[in-house]
Amino acid sequence: MNEVRIGMLGFGRIGRLHAANLAHSVKGAKLVAVADPYLNDDGIAVCKALGVERWGKDEEPIFAAKDIDAVFICSPTGYHTDFIRRAAAQGKHIFCEKPIGLELDDINSALDAVKKAGVKLQLGFVRRFDHNHRKVQQDVASGKLGAPHIVKVCSRDPEQPPEAYVKVSGGLFVDMMIHDFDMAMYLAGSDITEVFTLGAVKIDPMFAKYDDVDTAVVSLKFANGAIGVIDNSRAARYGYDQRVEVHCDKGCTRDENDLISTNIVSTADGVVTEKPTWFFLERYNDAFIEETKEFVNAILSDTDVPVGGHEGIMSVAVAMAAKKSLDEHRPVALSEIL
Amino acid sequence: MNEVRIGMLGFGRIGRLHAANLAHSVKGAKLVAVADPYLNDDGIAVCKALGVERWGKDEEPIFAAKDIDAVFICSPTGYHTDFIRRAAAQGKHIFCEKPIGLELDDINSALDAVKKAGVKLQLGFVRRFDHNHRKVQQDVASGKLGAPHIVKVCSRDPEQPPEAYVKVSGGLFVDMMIHDFDMAMYLAGSDITEVFTLGAVKIDPMFAKYDDVDTAVVSLKFANGAIGVIDNSRAARYGYDQRVEVHCDKGCTRDENDLISTNIVSTADGVVTEKPTWFFLERYNDAFIEETKEFVNAILSDTDVPVGGHEGIMSVAVAMAAKKSLDEHRPVALSEIL
Amino acid sequence: MNEVRIGMLGFGRIGRLHAANLAHSVKGAKLVAVADPYLNDDGIAVCKALGVERWGKDEEPIFAAKDIDAVFICSPTGYHTDFIRRAAAQGKHIFCEKPIGLELDDINSALDAVKKAGVKLQLGFVRRFDHNHRKVQQDVASGKLGAPHIVKVCSRDPEQPPEAYVKVSGGLFVDMMIHDFDMAMYLAGSDITEVFTLGAVKIDPMFAKYDDVDTAVVSLKFANGAIGVIDNSRAARYGYDQRVEVHCDKGCTRDENDLISTNIVSTADGVVTEKPTWFFLERYNDAFIEETKEFVNAILSDTDVPVGGHEGIMSVAVAMAAKKSLDEHRPVALSEIL
Amino acid sequence: MNEVRIGMLGFGRIGRLHAANLAHSVKGAKLVAVADPYLNDDGIAVCKALGVERWGKDEEPIFAAKDIDAVFICSPTGYHTDFIRRAAAQGKHIFCEKPIGLELDDINSALDAVKKAGVKLQLGFVRRFDHNHRKVQQDVASGKLGAPHIVKVCSRDPEQPPEAYVKVSGGLFVDMMIHDFDMAMYLAGSDITEVFTLGAVKIDPMFAKYDDVDTAVVSLKFANGAIGVIDNSRAARYGYDQRVEVHCDKGCTRDENDLISTNIVSTADGVVTEKPTWFFLERYNDAFIEETKEFVNAILSDTDVPVGGHEGIMSVAVAMAAKKSLDEHRPVALSEIL
């Protein structure tokens, strides 16, 4: 195969982002078709500008198409597992946004379908493809620093989402911290086996209406004996705060935020540097391209995808454990969930 | 009073450090007498060089001396509360190294004696006087950042202590993390109300022989609703890692390590900067001077000491709770301890 | 006009870079035709991949084409002014790489042709479009720091060019430092009026064979009374060093290099951070896109280009003055050159 | 000799600074006597507090005293060479503040007297003893980076001196930049052989009244073939800006300012770090102690002083050349001066 022909399921913000990357920045990929039940004139104009061949509101033609090798699942979470099963049934490779699903049995059934069909499934844990975090992971994985002892992930959004979003988000753990659970396991090179959650409503009492929190600190135990912690805030005000750190036997590897520029202004009032890049679209722009390149290359060269079904189900299970820990105010083992 | 005349109880490493600071860097203080049961020729030479008037192996003359206004308790922890009671009984002000004691009833009895005598008692939580941490605390206390949401303390020693030390240390929580518990309460401006501990033996199996850990992550709840986390390692290899951070409603204030120099060397092999200053004597050198100055000034001006008995007992109680949490693998409320 | 239709003259490294940017990243631009006397199969394959409509070895069809609105001049410097005159004669807008030319009379004649034709001419001083340097310039131009006093530009290449390049480069001042002369005038918001050059052959005696230097420090006087300095090295080894600084009446604004990542590794051996991005293709990747966007927008909206003929001739004249200063070992006023 | 007994000539700000350091921080030194024609009650109180044995307005008793081994010359510059000659005549070692003098013949005569007497003479170029700059110098001197190519010194005062000071200062080059000339030679490991000066009055027209400038950029040639540049400003507003950089064959070594703290505050308004330590007393506090220790050790161990007469006269000669270059607007060789 010289080219991966792709059908896209869901054409909202994240779908369009991937579509533009496929069109402009990913060699060996061709976005052939788009389906979205809410596709409007604006979406069609985007399709035309990107050279998409066909589009529509019904997703079925994409699964049925003989000339489509792979699908990008960018629909709401509730559709993920169904689309995975239908794509697998047609022998199509799958790129699926996170979270893979909301019910473990359902996710397992989707993963079984993928396994049976022998297709590739890559999950959209985009932060694994970030230049800063990847360097930290590589330092750990190289073994040059010895075993990891403490894994720390600081992850804060610049501003809280609107109430309409919070209502259907599934809560902080499955909506936001799921990225950080995956990052923590990526950095540690090991699955999380237990969590303990402290959560608080500090930013907006609205979160409490939905049995949600806006601020959380979650302690982690890993299968390899490392321990760690994640802290989340829904509103950091100064921008998107994304820092990770792994303290190892022989030293520590960590990263700092990417900044808008390296500028430094010194006056009698103080020394001012720039804020972090605003949010995930700015911060992980290159990582979105990189994850897509690696997915396409895995298909073209028939090699393993860099992040797959195991990561998909583990991250959801850890998010469930974290919420259970918050509710029951005790450490929760993953063995209670999986 | 123009001058505080001081007697020193214990003349080991920390006693001599305070003695040199009193002699050279603290106006209004005069180190009059030194007592240490192991005082040797070397110690006597130090006394002479610093202009100490009298010295000996017996501590009783210091308590009895009419010309001594205050004592510095720099003896092993086991003697702290006894010396506090004896100093208080003689109306002497007291500077006591941390931890104040090892048993809560005993500590309470010492604090009662201090209260009854109306003398000042300052605890040696030196890190409160560090220029970096204090700036963070001031940012929070000023209120300009709004309420604190998340308090983080990263505290790692450069190298593990010898086995002989570990054996009698009381364990990581009361020996090492006690500083960080105090720091966390200092930064939050609020007492810790609950802890949950993850601990591990990662550096040296020797720690396990003494029911101790060398690596720990402790989650914290504060009375004011903030949450937080401390991570400790007994051996960071690259130096003394001392970073704190408080994420607040309107932003985040944090500090970085002090470095040996600001030098940056760029070659084809990479860009190398200097390591943190090696250990607490280097890192908190100025803070040791500052805490002593503030103690002396509090006496001379009859004002409150900056850190007193409440901080002394709270830090010990939190350390106890942290160990209990480790042993019982559950969150432990301070109300179970105090 | 909704779209600027572009013909490209010269399809070497920089031509292909602009071509890819026009195809993928610049809305409102369409690369229609390519001409290069050395166009080979590889170049034709690139044309096809980018959707170029026609290509060939002869440049004349591009000037003659009625459906081409603008040209990108990416040929060797010796052809720049001829191509400018020919494009202007056909009423085409012009983007021209630096330097605009090598002879002042010849440059002036090209600028006259541009003026007479009323077309737009933008020079390829790509660094003006860099996020870091632009922030420094904006700080100065905003006036909030008061008048500029000292302008500093540090500009070092990671490795020396091959002898074949040095031979025909025109020398360090017109080949390399010309970017920095333009940057200095951009930052100061004022033309350079005098230079004094110190040069040395420190990296490779080869440079001396061509009456060239590989290391230089050039002092600058500006029309607005500011003073400044540029330092250049042909081989910094650690990467592309691109730092600027403007010290003003009320403070200083400066930038640091962009790094490969924000990673920090701390071990007993030291604290290692990443090197700067390797060279101009990596460092100014986004700036190349931005300069093209602004050129295209200036045409579409019929507004002024951000950097034009004045900057083109001034930078060449300052480079000539700098070489004259090196040769005659005295300060040289621009009035001696222009 | 176990102890160096010292007499101090001049007891103003810098004299008292050295006196306190000798008393508190320098082992093996004993400040015996102080002389200052303006010695007042305040000065006498300082003498008493520091344990000085005797004091007075007349300097002659210090030169005559049999029990004094060394003098610190902290008087106004006009007295330096006379005091050096008188101290040398009595066989006393000499620490002399910069500049050593204002006339080359006079300086040479003083240096001859020192040489004839066989006493040690150390000049007060305190910045050589700074932890940051010294690390840069050591990197260069070690040879690991290869030959130095470009030496850069950025040196800016936080605020301009009062007119009364400017009037008698001798001008920017001999008063302020003299430190930077010495620093540049220290870093390069080589004497300056030529300078070219750009100067400007940007901060306050008052400077022009005294044929002085407040802003300057001076290009440098060194005997070893390196080139360099110093920039000075009398008023940086944001604090004392003291950064040096040496670009070498294999890479670059540089330093950054010491900051008041490592604090970082991030809010919606930006990311604010602390300013540099305010001025030389804060910035070079430890360096003042270190230079005195090394002087005392050189006497006790009869080894070479770290900075002596050659550095004293060279820095003055370079300052003269820099002023001549400004006046005559041409590069000036040191051979024209010395």
Image: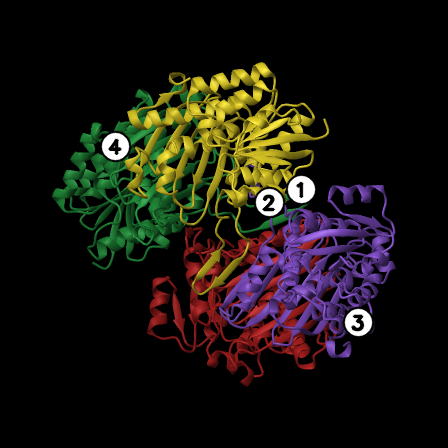
Chain colours: A red, B purple, C green, D yellow
Q: Nearer the viewer, residue A31 or C256?
A: C256
Please give the residue where the numbered disc 4 appears in the rendered image.
Answer: C317
Estimate the spatial distance between the alpha carbons at disc 1 and disc 3, rounded to whole Å.
37 Å
Q: Secondary structure at mark 3?
A: helix
- Kindly identify which chain the residue marked by label 3 belongs to: B
* Residues tagged by mark 1 and mark 2 found on one chain of the structure: yes
Taking the spot 64% from the left edge, 34% from the top edge, the residue there is D32
Q: Where residue A197 sits in the image (x, y, percent)? A: 66, 74
Query: Is mark 1 in CB contact (under 8 Å) with mark 3?
Result: no
Please give the residue where the numbered disc 3 appears in the rendered image.
Answer: B324
Taking the spot 34% from the left edge, 24% from the top edge, the residue there is D324
Whether residue D120 is visible to the viewer of this picture, yes or no, is: yes
Q: Where residue D27 sits in the image (x, y, percent)? A: 69, 36
Please give the residue where the numbered disc 2 appears in the rendered image.
Answer: C272
In the image, which is nearer the foreground, mark 3 or mark 2? 3
Q: Secondary structure at mark 4?
A: helix
How would you rate the neighbour count of disc 1 (Cα within 10 Å): few for under 14, some for 14-19, many for 20 or more?
A: some
How would you rate the neighbour count of disc 3 (Cα within 10 Å): few for under 14, some for 14-19, many for 20 or more?
A: some
Estimate the spatial distance between the alpha carbons at disc 4 and disc 1, rounded to whole Å.
49 Å
